[in-house]
Image (cartoon, helix red, strand yellow):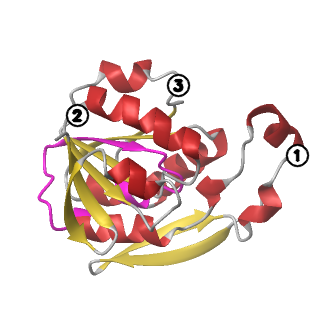
Amino acid sequence: MDLIDEDVEISGRVLRLLRPPQPDALIDEEAFDDDEFLPYWAELWPSGVALAEVICRLGLRGARVLELGAGLGLPSLTAALEGADVFATDWAEDAVALLRNNAERNGIALRAECVRWDDPAPLLAGAPWDVVLGADLLYERRNADQLLKLLPRLGGDLLLAEPGRPFAKAFLDRWSVETLADGVYRLRLP
């Protein structure tokens, strides 16, 4: 896989990230036919950047943090830099491998594993988490449905960066929502 090297600044810190230059080039017709898999993980989404910026203000030293759908893992990398014990997860093996590589390149210690939300045993084994992170996770209805069932079982402070995907409003209406920044929310069960 071809990769580009990019510097990303978060609250004055620069992280060097390898990432695919054209995520659409990673689309695999066979993988899509099997599981409707698209390489969403390969994009540096603005929601991930926004969540990483908020993380810098939270004081996470010593917190046990879980990121769901980590993709390139910018929120996880930032939380680990802030002193959190981070478990970053994604369902794409390539995402997890690249996240591990980027953590190592930046001298950041974290755990990263391939975990599916419909098989959440590794996520539940660590529950309750102090903080659960997610950036731009509601791009498909099945994601919103799975998260509505999964998130209450994970415990902790739920932080979601959401740019206004079609399923976001109905999802957010199920929670007590506090706005932390533009498009970044703290969710609590009502």
Q: Amino acid at mark 3?
A: Asp
How far is the residue under mark 2 from the one under mark 3? 18 Å
Which residue in the protein does label 1 denote? 29
Up/down of 40 relative to 21, above or below: above
SS at circle 2: loop
Let me know if residue 112 appears in the view: no
Q: Please tell me which residue lies in front, 132 or 33.
A: 33
Count the labels in the image.
Answer: 3
Coordinates of residue 181 in the picture (x, y in percent) = 25, 72
Cα–Cα gap, marks 1 and 3: 22 Å
Left or right: where does residue 183 sit relative to residue 21?
A: left
Instruction: Using the image, tell me which numbered label, if any, was put on residue 118.
Output: 3
Residue 51, how many percent across, how many down? 33, 64
Q: Position of residue 106 (x, y in %)?
A: 42, 61
Indicate left or right for 103 with 176 as reference. right
The 10 Å Cα crowd at callout 2, few under 14, some 14 to 19, many 20 or more, is many
Residue interval drawn in magenta: 55-76
Q: Earlier in the sequence, mark 1 or mark 3?
A: 1
Disc 2 designates what residue?
129
Q: Name the residue at 40% across, 70% down.
A: 49
**Residues at circles 1 and 3 in contact by the CB criterion of under 8 Å:** no
